[in-house]
Image (cartoon, coloured by chain):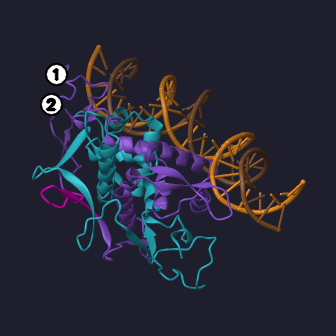
Chain colours: A cyan, B purple, C orange, D brown
Amino acid sequence: MKWADYDSTVCSVARTVEVLGDRWTLLVLRDVFNGIRRFADLSAHLGIARDVLAKRLAALVEEGLISRVPYQEPGARTRYEYRLTDAGRELRPVLLALLEWGDRHRCDAAGPPAQLFHAECGAPVRVEVRCAEGHEIGPRTRLTAKPGPGSRLAPGSRPAQPGSRSAQPATVPTSSP
Amino acid sequence: MKWADYDSTVCSVARTVEVLGDRWTLLVLRDVFNGIRRFADLSAHLGIARDVLAKRLAALVEEGLISRVPYQEPGARTRYEYRLTDAGRELRPVLLALLEWGDRHRCDAAGPPAQLFHAECGAPVRVEVRCAEGHEIGPRTRLTAKPGPGSRLAPGSRPAQPGSRSAQPATVPTSSP
DNA sequence: TCCCTGAGTTTGGAAGCCGGACTCAGGCTA
DNA sequence: TAGCCTGAGTCCGGCTTCCAAACTCAGGGA
């Protein structure tokens, strides 16, 4: 059983990418993370077409990553703004990982455009990958993937034991040489 | 100076999203990470249209995330396969962060479709966000963003001190309430 | 000579993105 | 009371991607 034998759409990466895998969604979330919450402000800051922004926001609300909450400024009628939900906030590691990669590989000579610090202690923030034993996982560290309980075989490939949902959990080496 | 006053396209997240922000690129990388390296295998496993796959692979090579290396099976002519470069391998935290979010928020009842372990010690792997002092950064921990050396003001907003590239590094609270 | 295979390219229709114009609800102004 | 303004969208025509299916191309084998 190789990785290729499993259904590629039943994968947490695939499912997450389905939610936020287009040119704008991640940038909308980034701005909401940074405190931009109103339609007009998002539209102006991102330079996104308005109808596309409306569709993205609706989709994000639908997916439960942001919520649409009413607000009222003095002497104006009730309007709506967008705030992260808990599920949305949990995407921070994704954004930080993207940020770090961009800082390393897509900086111009001047240096990174922004730096993030822990508000309480002022120390810079970074994303780490570790195993439960505490070993740091670098880009060349080998990982092993085991099909979990929710895995499914690809439509085309016959299971080793017809009837058993997830065939023997043979390990799949990850990260190519 | 608020976050909204800075040019949204000069941002490492934006630049990274530009490289891999469409429905397929991250999934192609995921499969290459998992050892699928040939055009036909990628095409079959992902179910992506062939022309789109060709374009994505060419773009990823162009961006330096994968390289196109010749191989030859006995009795066949030379063909090409795709392997991660170092820059590509450094995207692993991004994929792992996506994986973790999907595992938490888009699993079906059966459980996660795949689990990853450190090949050497067998312990499960996870993505952590920490500050340099070692404090763990959770989804509600407040962060502070300071404009770095490469920041640029948005075209529309006038700088506080005309002439200075990055205006005074006022801090921007991140993560909305 | 013909057939097969992997790795694309071409093609025509469907879907998505863009900028700009338009709508809609309510408060403010005259 | 009519008219104006503003934020938050929706609508529209043109242009660019996406898709599936058919086609091409280079070499090895029968």
In the rendered view, would you say D24 is above or below A162? above
Q: Which residues are magenta?
A: B127-140
Q: Main SS of the magenta segment? A: loop
Check the picture and name the quadrant holding the N terminus of chain B. top left
Alpha carbon distance from label 2 to label 1: 8 Å
Give the mark nearest the N terminus, 2 or 1.
Answer: 1
Q: Is residue A89 magenta?
A: no
In the rendered view, would you say B153 is above or below A164? above
**Same chain for marks 2 and 1?**
yes
- Few, some or many residues within 10 Å of mark 2 (<14, 14–19, 20+): few
Amino acid carrying mark 2 in the image: Gln
> Numbered disc 2: what chain?
B
Q: Which mark is residue B161?
A: 1
List the residue tagged with mark 2.
B168
Query: Is B155 on the left-hand or right-hand side of B17?
Result: left
Residue drawn where x is 24% and y is 33% of the image: A75
x and y, in percent, of residue B104 in the image: 36, 67
x and y, in percent, of residue A176 in the image: 44, 62
- Few, some or many residues within 10 Å of mark 1 (<14, 14–19, 20+): few
Q: Are marks 2 and 1 in contact (CB under 8 Å)?
A: yes
Residue drawn where x is 34% and y is 59% of the image: A139
Amino acid carrying mark 1 in the image: Gln
Residue B23 visible, this orientation: no
Residue drawn where x is 34% and y is 38% of the image: A42
Query: Is B45 on the left-hand or right-hand side of B67?
Result: right
Residue drawn where x is 27% and y is 35% of the image: B4
In the rendered view, would you say B175 is above or below B120? above
Tell which of D20 and B2 is nearer to you: D20
x and y, in percent, of residue A115 in the image: 21, 43
